[in-house]
Image (tube, rainbow, N blue to C red):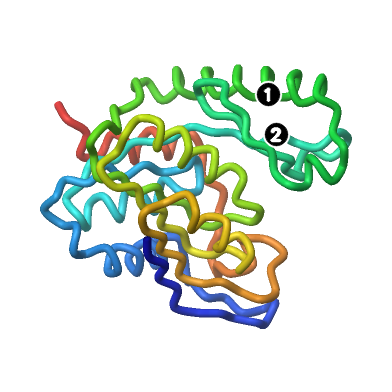
Amino acid sequence: MGYAGVESPDSETTHVFASREQAAERIAEQLARYRGQHPLVLAIPRGGVPMGRVVADALDGELDVVLVHKLGAPGNPEFAIGSVDESGKVVLSPAAHALHIDEDYVARESARQLERLHERRLRYGRAPVDARARLCIVVDDGVATGATLIAALRALRAQGPRRLIAAIGVAPAETVASLEKEVDELVCLAAPTVFYAVSQFFAEFAQVSDDEVIALLSQGAPG
């Protein structure tokens, strides 16, 4: 297991990256030794997909998405208490236990978000790529609690990849420690001491649409 982190900004106004694409180029540089091994690059939609495209192209790999969705807290849907993957497996964050979230609420929220995942898979028009025995690189622009990314990593680990790597732009130091336990290798470009949102570390951080995701996935797709 390895962890590559290159910056630890402590200013809440510091932009570490000009854009997602710049962050992806730096990730690709750190993973350059995997070029020629046809890695399966799995991006977390939607923000991770532009980065995944750059990494896949740089490493001569194959791009797909891994679909997971966060579970929002009661009355505060933007606050993640966990996540669910396409198989319906739920991963709860420590916050869910600290807030004593009701099991019935978790079941209802999980079912609602699972339906959204199935709708998104249909919208993207592609079945999941089999990760078994593949070199898998999971890419995202950044994470806060890491619950969504951990759910994605556990779903992939269950498929039996040859090697599982997570590659992200930025995450809080405590989240980095949690992610290290889930992968064979972790690349995190920045682990700031002051962290409010992933967007604060990117000078350009536009929303990514589903149409953009579909276009990026179609580039270099087989056939």
Task: Check residue 146 in the rendering and tell me which mark sits there, or answer none.
Answer: none
Question: Going 70% across and 34% down the picture, which residue do you hit?
Answer: 71
Q: Nearer the viewer, residue 181 or 138?
A: 181
Residue 147 pos. (x, y %): 62, 45
Numbered tag placed on residue 110 in the rendering = 1
In this figure, which residue is indicated by the disc labeled 2? 71
- The quarter holding residue 75 reads top right
Q: Amino acid at mark 1?
A: Ser
**Residue 197, image x, y percentages:** 67, 61
Circles 1 and 2, Cβ within 8 Å, touching? The answer is: yes
Residue 86 in the image: state x and y as whole percent.
50, 24
> Is 138 left, or right, of 79 in this rendering?
left
The amino acid at mark 2 is: Leu
Return the residue nearer the eye: 152 or 209. 152
Image: 79 above or below 90: below
| Residue displayed at 66% across by 53% down | 145
What distance separates the C-alpha of mark 1 from that of mark 2?
7 Å
Mark 1 and mark 2 lie on one chain; the one further toward the N terminus is 2
**Is disc 2 surrounded by few (<14), some (14 to 19) or many (20+) residues within 10 Å?**
many
Decide: few, some or many residues near mark 1? Use Cα within 10 Å; few <14, some 14-19, many ≥20.
many
Please identify the quarter of the rendering in which residue 143 is found. Answer: bottom right
